[in-house]
Amino acid sequence: MKSFNLLFQSEELFIQFVKKHELNEYPNVLVSVFCGKVYETTIEKVANIIQTHIPRAAVIGCTTDGEIMGGTHTSEEIVISFTVFEKTEVKSFSIKDINKFNAKFLGEDIGMSHTTIDTKAIIILSSHDANESTLFIEGIQKVAPNTEVAGGLAGDNGHYKKQLVFDGKQIIENGIVGVVLDSQVLQAHTGYHSKWKEVGRPFLITKASGNIVYSIEQKKPLQILKQYLGQGFISRLPISSAEFPFVLKNSMEKRPIFIRKVEENGAIQLSEEVTEGDELTFAYADTETLIDHSTRGLKKLAKKSVESIFVFPCMSRRRFFSDFTNYELRILEQIAPSVGFFCYGEIVKKDQNLLIEGNAMTYLALSESKGSKEVPKHIIKFKGTNQVNTMMAFTQLMEASTEDLRQMHDNVQLSEQYYRSLFDHNSDVVYSTDLNGRFTSANPSFEEVFGYEKSEFLGKSALKFIQDKDIPRVRNHFYRTMRGKEQFYELEVVSKNGSTHMLHIKNIPIIVNGEMVGVYGIGRDITEKIRTEEKVTHLAHFDHETGLANRTLFSEMVVDQIKKAKKKKRSLAAMFIDMDRFKIINDSLGHTAGDYVLKELAYRIQNSLPRGSFMGRFGGDKFTVLISQDGTEKDYYDIAYRISENIKKPVIFDQQEFFISSSIGVSMYPTDGTDSDTLLRNSDAAMNRAKLMGGSRIVFFSSELNEKAIKRLEMERELRKALKRNEFHLVFQPIVDLKTNRITGSEALIRWVHPRYGTVAPGVFIPIAEETGIIKEIGEWVLKEACNQNANWHKQGYNDLTISVNVSAHQLLDPAFVLQVDRAIEESGLSPEFLYLELTESVMIGNLDYCLRVMNELQHMGINISIDDFGTGYSSLSYIKTLPANRLKIDKSFIDHLSRNAPDLAVVQAVIMMGNGLNMNVVAEGVETKEQASVLLDLQCEYVQGYYFSRPLQKEDFEKQLPTQFLTV
């Protein structure tokens, strides 16, 4: 990777710089812009220049309190950095109006949708307050805990009025921009240099709201500030707050917090929210410790193979600690090309937690190559300046004023603390004996492990509390300790209540005035460690939930049995067993019920097998069986049939009966495969064929099955290319007002025309798309196309038309879905109230809590929710009243046989009445006859769709119906 930095002056010089470094030739370029000019017109101009001349680059930027480049810094200039990656993918994201969303939930969404196992680093620039920004990065960290995160809050030259971030396309005043760096080889290191010391006593916040503090210890905050820091400090606020910030102490942590503004009523506005009862203490920079911390950090960084550095120091360091800050910037530039900006808050990692810090120097060092190097001597040297020496003297003076008292207290407490640390607060067993091996002391952990009180063991021989078989060994270790040698050994002890513990014992001689007076013993309880090691060994070969062999162990069994069958010239059979539509149980009743049912089914399969058989689980609801006894195809069919019949018996859970069927695929050795991989692959193919035939079947492998599996894989590959080849298009089925026969909207339906296969039915390619996950990309394309088309019809004057779009489970459960919908609405210009998102019951029930959050977010954005196929799922009437929905769609299965005397009439009538009672409009789909339409009209159903009115239409045919918007039927 390479870095090039430019102080922007004109478009002409920018173009020359781009050509000189051939920046248009690279596929992965990150352009970072740090702008000291807080003018939107200037930022737009620079962004347009970048987009025009490097259109493929990922762009992030912000306004600053000082721009950093080449080891120095400027004011009110524009610095542009170009980072060129060879082996790293750069993905950008942006969020505006972050206060519209739950910041932590949004951070989790971005983390889940943008990061991968190869994500090494994320750079985040925020124009929002520290509180919301901290919640956002907490959400990122929850999803990507091992990813390095760096960045900071935008500045505006100390005015605290307007901070901006931008991504090359839009300027955001209240949001976040960022980039994600994905690579298998990228090395990323973060660090921060900061150290505060508290001075004086803490002050209690007695009245506050959000980040506004109205009183401190019942006094106006300005009174406190004037008393301790003087009028001059107040007159220079908020800049002076960087010299002496508060340290905020609450129930969770301590951290610096700065005054951003003085209110007219004497209240103060802080850099983040506080609550009444929090404590504030004045603080100052611990100069000597900070310099030492920073120097050691720079020395450590200089040893690494670093190719580029992004640096984010606090603006307070530039104003009040400039000499050493300038030194840090120069050293960073000597290590690698550096660029960055002075922030209003920096992202740091403290105790493995990400947060917004103050007065810190943070950095992100990147490299696409590994290795280390010698540290140049000048890296670790800093010659003190007058400014730094004065600050160090001040720090020493403040520290010395309390050091004497602290030392006196420490001396008094030292011996007692040593004792308590060694005995009372040690989780290990700690004890001592005299020279005869009699106990003289023991800590609480000893009593807990052995179960004896002190009166039962003090003064007694330690040998009485161990097993007879161990006495000679323990006695030898004791004598060796008496000769001055530490001893280590493991010992199983039995407590008073009969439980056993494995201890790792360390014996240490006790020497007083050069003479041996006894022995210390320290025992670490390793019982759980041993159990864990045994458990890890078990987990490596067995399924956790059922105790069956996992894929690894089962495959080894197959290899072993094939070797035996080959020697004895006998046959084998491998079976794959998959439960039909098992996902419905998980979705409707949760995984607790699903796990119970799976264990019951595993038990039934096991009891259906002949002796000498092996069973495994390959995850989910898929089981494997190996029949090792010699047999014919009929013999193996009888076994599979017995398994199938036992599975079909009802399973009772929580006083409910569940009826489950299975698809079983069988392959035989040696006819269908002479090695483990082939035999298992072919039985899997046979099982998949059984499922495609409708399930509840037993299918034996044949070469024809292999050909069909290959054809399905080919279909999957073609489906992945279909979006790029523009092979999809939409058709639109009118939704009609039943009273007027007027078109009120349409449902967008996808169609695929393949150059070789021709028109591929949705029933063929949609299941493949859902199984492979491609449905998320296809669904996003449908959403955008549908919104764009409906927006175009609005522009043509059909302002009341709605558009309905089906949403799959994969889309709804995708953390980025809400942002995708928001983007589709914004880019198309369609008003959100004209979009209906159709969700099926089965999608929601198993993940109801999460789905409710997403649905509420969508409705907050003004988008309508439609419940599709209503009445075909589980527990519909009990949960529908909890859903934030606008429309119910009666499933076609209830309409197919609808007549005035049909049993379905009562069901349809009840659904319509319920929808009306819940203020939802109702749509009946699948209306194909005049009688069905007439009955629905009598039942006061508002809207319908179906072949009686119109089949799905191409865009041009649909538009022919629009001039009158009436259908003639």
Image (tube, grey):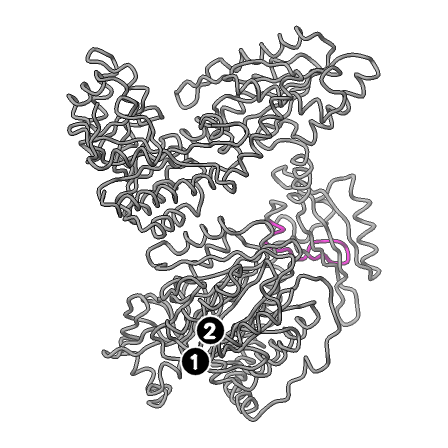
Amino acid under disc 2: Gly
Coordinates of residue 53 in the picture (x, y in percent):
51, 66
Split into 4 quadrants, where in the image is the N terminus? bottom right
Q: Residue at x 45, y 17 (%)?
A: 659
Disc 2 secondary structure class: loop
Split into 4 quadrants, where in the image is the C terminus? top left
List the residue tagged with mark 1.
Answer: 242
Q: Which mark is residue 358?
A: 2
Coordinates of residue 928 in the picture (x, y in percent):
28, 19
Mark 2 and mark 1 lie on one chain; the one further toward the N terminus is 1
Work out whether residue 664 or residue 936 is closer to the camera in this orientation and state it.
936
In this rendering, position of residue 933 left or right of residue 96: left
Q: Are marks 2 and 1 in contact (CB under 8 Å)?
A: yes
Coordinates of residue 578 in the picture (x, y in percent):
56, 22
Work out whether residue 146 or residue 934 is closer to the camera in this orientation and state it.
934
Work out whether residue 886 or residue 831 is closer to the camera in this orientation and state it.
831
- What range of the chain is rendered magenta? 432-447
Height in image: 557 above or below 838?
above
Spatial distance from mark 2 to mark 1, Cα to Cα? 8 Å
Q: Quadrant of residue 451?
A: top right
Height in image: 166 above or below 874?
below
In this rendering, position of residue 765 left or right of residue 498: left
Badge 1: residue crowd in 10 Å (few <14, some 14–19, many ≥20):
many
Q: Residue at x 16, y 29 (%)?
A: 740
Q: Is residue 239 magenta?
A: no
Height in image: 403 above or below 190?
below
Badge 2: residue crowd in 10 Å (few <14, some 14–19, many ≥20):
many
Q: Is residue 446 magenta?
A: yes
Amino acid under disc 1: Ala
